[in-house]
Image: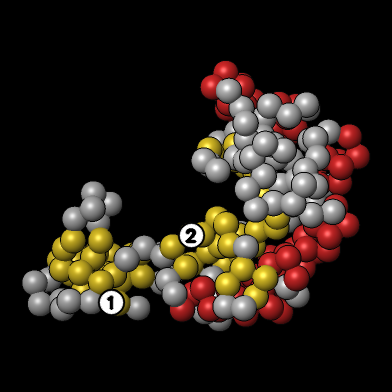
């Protein structure tokens, strides 16, 4: 496929030209008569709690697939359904829906839907002092609660407060399982945040 228009370059500049691609960009040709349509990289949204009347916390796999199609029409090429703090039984049910949608995602993506990258779990391992809109069901990232979360096969990103008891060990174990840890909803000091980064946290969200 070839598209013509104004192409957004990595340095922020715009050039007129043609982009040829299949599953990835194959060629870029400059052309002064390429038109005024914009050609931009697809958006990757790492936190989608819901949209278009679909709440991730209550969505079926089919509803998540429908949301993938909605997001693709708005420019997203990939996204992460995001669960918030809730009883572990509820989080497990959300995870199962996300896992099924995630496993079906390659087929759906080829049909024009944004790819599901796995589940983002925003809580329950967050600071009681920085709950934001989360309910007071926060837990420490250790013991049986943490083991249940660690075993979730579609978990790819977890927001965690590193200053909580067990937080640094949890970051190490999540990182070893290729789950990205985002420091967020935290009351950590600078030293505590740096310890979280040293343990393997790769993102920082100001909440």
Q: Is residue 201 above or below residue 35?
A: above
Residue 185 picture location, percent across and down:
62, 41
Q: Residue at x 68, y 26 (%)?
A: 163
Determine the secondary structure under disc 1: strand
The image quarter containing residue 113 is bottom right
Determine the secondary structure under disc 2: strand
Residue 64 picture location, percent across and down:
66, 73
- Give the number of callouts: 2
Q: Is residue 166 above or below residue 154?
A: above
Distance, label 1 to label 2, CA atoms, is 21 Å
Frontmost residue, 111 versus 198: 198
Q: Residue at x 62, y 63 (%)?
A: 49
The image quarter containing residue 93 is bottom right
**Identity of the residue furthest to the left in this view:** 32
Going by the image, does 14 lie left or right of 88?
Answer: left
Please give the residue where the numbered disc 2 appears in the rendered image. Answer: 44
- Visible residue check, residue 103: no
Please give the residue where the numbered disc 1 appears in the rendered image. Answer: 3
Q: Residue at x 65, y 53 (%)?
A: 133
Residue 97 picture location, percent across and down:
77, 68
Going by the image, does 118 lie left or right of 145?
Answer: left
- Visible residue check, residue 126: yes
């Amino acid at each position: 496929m070839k598209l013509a228009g104004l192409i957004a370059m990595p340095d922020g500049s715009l050039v007129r030209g043609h982009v040829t691609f299949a599953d990835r960009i194959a060629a870029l040709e400059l052309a002064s008569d390429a038109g005024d349509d914009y050609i931009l990289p697809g958006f990757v949204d790492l936190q989608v709690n819901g949209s278009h009347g679909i709440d991730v916390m209550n969505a079926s796999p089919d509803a998540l697939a429908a949301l993938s199609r909605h997001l693709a029409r708005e420019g997203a090429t990939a996204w992460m359904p995001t669960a918030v703090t809730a009883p572990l039984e509820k989080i497990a049910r959300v995870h199962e829906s996300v896992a099924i949608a995630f496993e079906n995602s390659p087929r759906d993506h080829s049909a024009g839907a944004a790819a599901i990258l796995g589940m983002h779990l925003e809580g329950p391992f967050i600071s009681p002092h920085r709950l934001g809109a989360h309910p007071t069901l926060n837990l420490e990232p250790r013991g049986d609660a943490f083991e249940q979360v660690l075993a979730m096969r579609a978990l790819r990103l977890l927001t965690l407060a590193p200053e909580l008891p067990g937080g640094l060990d949890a970051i190490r174990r999540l990182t070893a399982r290729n789950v990205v840890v985002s420091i967020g909803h935290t009351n950590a000091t600078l030293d505590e945040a740096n310890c979280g980064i040293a343990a393997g946290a790769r993102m920082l969200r100001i909440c």
